[in-house]
Image: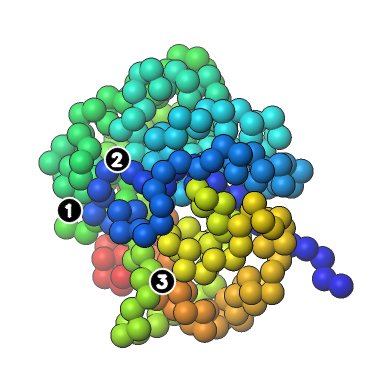
Amino acid sequence: MKKDVFPEWLHFEVFHGCNAKCIMCPVHDSKRQKGPMNYDVFLEGLRQISSWNLKGINLHGTGEPLLYSSLEKCIEQCKITGIPVGFSTNAALLTKERAFTVIDANPNWVSVSFEAVESSTYESIRKGLKYNNVFNNIMNFIELRNSKNLNISISLRYEIHTGINDDQCNKFYQFFRKFLKSKLDEIQFFNILDWPKLDLNKKAKGNIPCNVLNRCFVLNDGTVPLCCLDYDATLNLGNVMEQSIIEIWNSPQLVKIRDLHQRGKRNQVKLCSFCNLPDVRNVLLRYNDFSQTKLSELEQMINLSINTV
């Protein structure tokens, strides 16, 4: 009898929906019901995995977690389990008042998606958001964290859009490295993802196994999809209010999908055959030593990415 396997990460989509209309994100195309996760769904999911040896819990999915009024309660509940917890945000709602409540909840990390040093560039990508407001929110959050001398890791995530912001990476790094803490914080540079859509006329891509299949995602209604890119739960694997997460994770369907990936046959999984995540080096580079002043390695990676993706 085979032993159960466990995911390395657990994601709770605490809010499905967003206050922005970013040019690369499909959240507003999603057919699922927008809105918050019922807090009881979160508590049930957390109860099921509280004894697991997870690398961490992410409190975000396809949406902006700061739209969830119970976010800080969720962070506090995760901290009780001892499992590291954090979330990713566009920071537009990370006002001074909200920054205090988030800091008080003491997440292990906060990742901020922010990819420009010019307002016109930023607002052409993150439509509906204002550069100056978001910039001030980020700087205030960093200052507040630093003033309290807390070990909350702050990651700035810069998604590279060829021809739009790829010429601002160095200036971005040189500015923010002066305020972040080496070894604790990160500046990450990303490639753009081709969010999968079931286009039967689209040719299948490579067969490299996907590295997000070690992550379990729980949507706002408790549904478990195949992965984070399956934003409409095209492959509905179950619901945490009807089955345990461990049962879902070890279901014959998901075991077969993981096996196909490992054997280089991911194209036999319909949704996976139209996704480029495994084929693109999504995270180009991470910097957490801010004594570095040259980004020649990043520039080489950007050039390589432009020529090969």
What crowding class fits label 3: few (fewer than 14 Cα within 10 Å), some (14-19), or many (20 or more)?
many
Q: CA distance from mark 2 to mark 3?
A: 26 Å
Q: Is residue 137 above or below residue 123?
A: above
Q: Position of residue 206 (x, y in %)?
A: 44, 79
Which label belongs to residue 275? 3
Residue 240 coordinates in the image, percent (x, y): 64, 53
Label 1 sits on a secondary structure element that is loop
Q: Position of residue 57 (x, y in %)?
A: 59, 43
Helix or strand or loop: what does disc 2 sit on?
Answer: loop
**Amino acid on which the number 3 mark rests in the picture:** Cys
Kindly indicate whether the residue at mark 1 contacts the one at mark 3 (C-beta within 8 angstroms): no
Q: In the image, which is nearer the foreground, mark 2 or mark 3?
A: 2
The first of marks 2 and 3 along the sequence is 2
Q: Is residue 1 above or below residue 227?
A: below
Q: Residue at x 61, y 39 (%)?
A: 40
Which label was assigned to residue 19? 2
Q: Nearer the viewer, mark 2 or mark 1?
A: 2
Residue drawn at x 26%, y 66% as measured from the top left? 306
Location of the C terminus by quadrant is bottom left
